[in-house]
Amino acid sequence: MIKITLPDGSIKEYAQKSTPLDVAKSISEGLARNIVSAKFNENTVETTTPLTHDGSLVLYTWNDDEGKKAFWHSSAHILAQAILHFYPDAKLTIGPAIENGFYYDVDFGDESISENDFKKIEDQMLEFARQKFEFTMREVSKKDALDYYKKQHNEFKVELIENLTDGDITFCDHADFTDLCRGGHIPNTGFIKAIKIMSVAGAYWRGDEKNKQLTRVYGISFPKQKDLTAYLELLEEAKKRDHRKLGKELELFTFSQKVGQGLPLWLPKGAALRSRLEDFLKKAQQKAGYEMVITPHIGQKELYVTSGHYAKYGADSFQPIHTPKDDEEFLLKPMNCPHHCEIYNDRPYSYKELPKRFAEFGTVYRYEQSGELHGLTRVRGFTQDDAHIFCMQEQLDQEFKNVIDLSLYVLGSLGFENFTAQVSVRDLENPDKYIGDVKNWEKAEQAIINAANDKGLDYKIVTGEAAFYGPKLDFMVKDALGRNWQLGTIQVDYNLPERFDLTYKGSDNQLHRPVMIHRAPFGSMERFIALLLEHTGGNFPLWLTPEQAIILPISEKFEIYTKKVLNLMENYEIRALVDERNEKTGRKIRDAEVRKIPYMIIIGENEENEGVISVRRHGGEDLGKMTIEDFSVIVKKEIENTLQQFKV
Ligand SMILES: [Zn+2]
Ligand SMILES: [Zn+2]
């Protein structure tokens, strides 16, 4: 008998050579039907691998990331099988599972494939899938493995095998198809019920452009047809919500090749939206005891040598700016922290004055390769809603809680309800990696965990992910399409206070080192607005949206009344504009819908005579006739419902 430990800590005895599938069966028939992969003592195993000794076992279904990986890895085998079915001379190279699906890199020789071939490949793959071929692993000697692929004249697999150790090489067979493989498959091909070939692209063998160019065939597969349908719908929706597309349609931002790639230009509406977002945070920060500071966009190279940023990132950053005389060197500011340290150093502090909290919407510049740039999410210049808190070690606990409160307020006001946090702590086995006093580290980690518990955050602790200078907490936000975005970080720092020799006078009249906290709830304004665009599909909360209402007079006859309505709206501080075009009302309504303006105000003869307006909500709901004052109450209430005041 062998002892198997399950994830819930329970230990059960099984006969020698029981498989993960047997273990699943002993738990429930349902689980046995659904398991697609397993991990035994940290190694991926087949569901049919006989277990010969004690150990811990995790069973995975489609719903687990590991399960999807096995599913898609197995699908890549079937893709390769189908490709050889149609293109017997094609040479297979590698075919891994990826975040969404799988691919296979293939040398098609003189042949090529295009979108027109996708359907026949999908159909053939489904045909293979239906036959429920089992995946079986077998060990092969290096010599046999080499012979097998040499016979096929596949120099790619030969190269892969040459780098493997004899005794460590396995093949996977299903049907009459064989592939070099380390394992990790679903029990049989029958689990796969829906397949889509997504695209083809060029890819160099081993990612090196000196090597031969191959064809990468991307695909995705699912255990149910309806999962594929839902996935394709999600892709369609994501395309519609792409912030680059919406940013253009809503006239928020643009890029200019002349100005330079990765350097966003904010158009009037985008700039106004962004400053509303900044004002919103400034107001909350003021209540929370932050003081605004302003620092320049460049700093002497020496500043970043002191901070350590130059040694770490200098070579991969924008290179120094040289002055025409005096031979001075400046760097574009990659981070605001060194500047804020020097603001702290402007005068001595007593312990009674701490914490000091300096905040700045500070624009920083970081070099990104042109291929890495993407809309507002990957840029070369961006503005952080940055702040640095300088406090005593014993204040860390409270400060961390305060920062979490502020971050939760920000997320809540912008309609993010689905988020988790990650607490990154030291790797205790590598104590030399970290600077600062061990006791302080323990306290800081505990402070973060206490704060996360106290605030009821759904968080996980990740060992070894802390920076060398301190532990941190990151917020992960799930957007409306279920995609994860990493947002604001709260980071403890023992390093910069040392490097900048920051001190305060304690109650004992001696000088002490303060601890520093870096934090930015939005992260970067650019990236946050991109996320907000994709999350809301451009339907911003009413308090934030560029225009809250659009007035649609049904003809020019009502010009004077329209002006009056617009004036009154301004008096009520409602952001409104007029569609003055000589178009039919239906057309004006449709265009206002596209522009995602929350309220449409329709004005005609009845409205003018009665001194009222007709109100229609974005999306079609008709609110009927009302006075402008009544409308202002609706607007005010809606804003109050989403935007509460920050309370300390
Ligand atoms: Zn495989
Ligand atoms: Zn910082």
Image: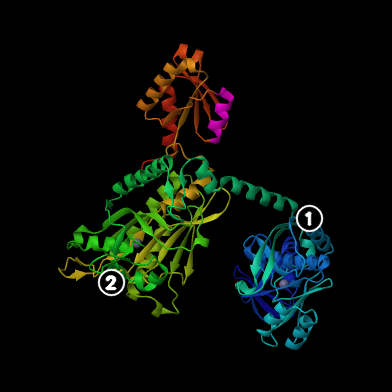
Q: In the structure shown, which secondary structural element does the residue marked by tag 2 occupy?
A: helix
Instruction: Tell me if 474 is positioned left or right of 103 in this view.
Output: left
- Mark 2 residue type: Arg
In the rendering, at what x and y percent does residue 405 appear?
38, 52
Is residue 592 part of the magenta span, yes or no? yes
In the rendering, at what x and y percent does residue 556 appear?
49, 18
Q: Is residue 417 visible?
A: yes
Q: Which mark, residue 615?
A: none
Q: Is mark 2 within 8 Å of ligand 2?
A: no
In the rendering, at what x and y percent does residue 577 appear?
44, 29
- Mark 1 residue type: Lys
Q: Is residue 391 visible?
A: no
- The extreme left residue here reads 509
In percent of the image, x 80 and y 82: which residue is there?
A: 151
Quadrant of the rendered image holding ligand 2:
bottom left
Q: Which mark, residue 119?
A: 1
In percent of the image, x 37 and y 30: which residue is there?
A: 573
Corner quadrant of residue 167: bottom right
Read off the residue under disc 2.
499
Read off the magenta span. Answer: 583-594
- As drawn, 276 above or below 513: above
Instruction: Tell me if 542 is positioned left or right of 358 in this view.
Output: right
Corner quadrant of residue 66: bottom right
